[in-house]
Image (spheres, rainbow, N blue to C red):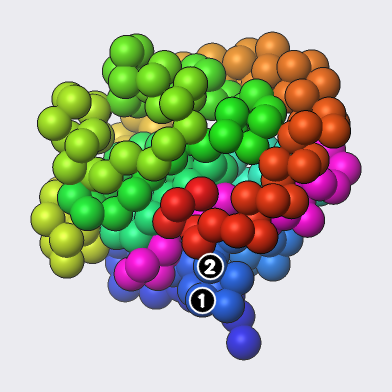
């Protein structure tokens, strides 16, 4: 059974990450399936926007312990390729992040062109909690999308924040009532899809050049520190202990 499904109801296609067993973690199967679905949706001439959904309880729980303890290729490079597939989609991708989004899963939501969060779900950039500094452009992305003060706080604190907390702090993303996330995202996607495909593509290309360039530069700066810290004995101890002891929402 596929962990990703695609609904091509043009002008808005919907990609659903549906790995309940794996809590929508960034497994090779989830990444490959989502990339393929984005390519198919983005290549359809009658599609002018794509909605990326997760499970009702979990949008994306980030990497697994095996990923965190594995090689750079397994841990970072494959995920970076995945995030670039979101940026590279020729039409806007909107994240309907109704469930929790943690670590790389939260970055995935923020790399989408439009991000919609739920008031009562939890969102975290919990890299320091596990003893290592982030990669994947996180040091650019969180301050850029959420605001400098709030984005910096998330990176340093490592704790999870309710969507309503982020809204109260003025986060630069939409936060809506539980149960309204998917509908709100679809409405926004349909609004975008009123524009001609060529105009939508050209605007996406302009914005992708700005975001992608800055994210790539941040990722390149982050890698040496990320590699040094995640390979430490303390980080490995924390990863093993925290993945064993904590439920996903408290990660």
Residue 45 image point, x, y percent = 42, 57
Which residue appears at 42% of the width and 63% of the height?
Answer: 58
Q: Which residue is mark 1?
A: 20
Between 103 and 183, the one lying in front of the other is: 103
- Label 2, label 1: how far apart the Cα atoms are: 5 Å
- In magenta, the rendered stretch is 50-72
Residues packed near mark 1 inside 10 Å, few (<14), some (14 to 19) or many (20 plus): some
Residue 84 image point, x, y percent = 60, 38
Which residue appears at 42% of the width and 36% of the height?
Answer: 159
Which residue appears at 63% of the width and 14% of the height?
Answer: 217
Between 58 and 36, the one lying in front of the other is: 58
Tell me: residue 108, above or below residue 35: above
Residue 156 shown in magenta: no
Tell me: residue 25, above or below residue 109: below
Q: Is residue 64 shown left or right of residue 173?
A: right
Between 200 and 28, the one lying in front of the other is: 28
Tell me: residue 59, above or below residue 146: below
Residue 204 image point, x, y percent = 39, 33
Visible residue check, residue 108? no
Task: Report the residue that reaches farthest toward the bottom.
Answer: 1
Tell me: residue 205, above or below residue 40: above
Which residue appears at 50% of the width and 61% of the height?
Answer: 247
Residue 170 image point, x, y percent = 17, 25
Q: Which residue is mark 2?
A: 23
Picture quadrant of residue 244: bottom right
Helix or strand or loop: what does disc 1 sit on?
A: loop
Helix or strand or loop: what does disc 2 sit on?
A: loop
Whether tag 2 and tag 1 are in contact, CB under 8 A, the answer is yes
The circle drawn on residue 192 is: none
């Amino acid at each position: 059974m596929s962990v990703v499904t695609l609904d091509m109801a043009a002008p808005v296609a919907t990609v659903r990450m549906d790995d309940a067993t794996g809590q929508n973690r960034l497994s090779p199967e989830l990444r490959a399936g989502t990339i393929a679905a984005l390519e198919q949706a983005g290549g359809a001439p009658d599609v002018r926007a794509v909605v990326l959904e997760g499970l009702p309880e979990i949008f994306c729980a980030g990497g697994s312990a095996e990923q965190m303890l594995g090689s750079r290729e397994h841990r970072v490079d494959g995920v970076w390729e995945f995030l670039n597939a979101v940026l590279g989609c020729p039409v806007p991708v909107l994240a309907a992040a109704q469930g929790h989004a943690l670590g790389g899963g939260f970055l995935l939501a923020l790399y989408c062109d439009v991000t919609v969060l739920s008031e009562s779900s939890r969102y975290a950039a919990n890299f320091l909690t596990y003893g290592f500094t982030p990669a994947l452009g996180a040091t650019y992305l969180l301050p850029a999308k959420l605001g400098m003060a709030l984005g910096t706080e998330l990176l340093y604190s490592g704790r999870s924040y309710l969507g309503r907390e982020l809204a109260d702090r003025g986060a630069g993303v939409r936060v809506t009532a539980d149960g309204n996330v998917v509908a709100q995202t679809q409405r926004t996607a349909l609004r975008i899809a009123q524009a001609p495909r060529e105009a939508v593509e050209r605007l996406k290309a302009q914005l992708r050049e700005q975001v992608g360039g800055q994210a790539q530069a941040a990722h390149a700066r982050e890698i040496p520190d990320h590699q040094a810290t995640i390979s430490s004995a303390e980080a490995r101890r924390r990863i093993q202990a925290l993945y064993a002891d904590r439920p996903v929402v408290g990660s």
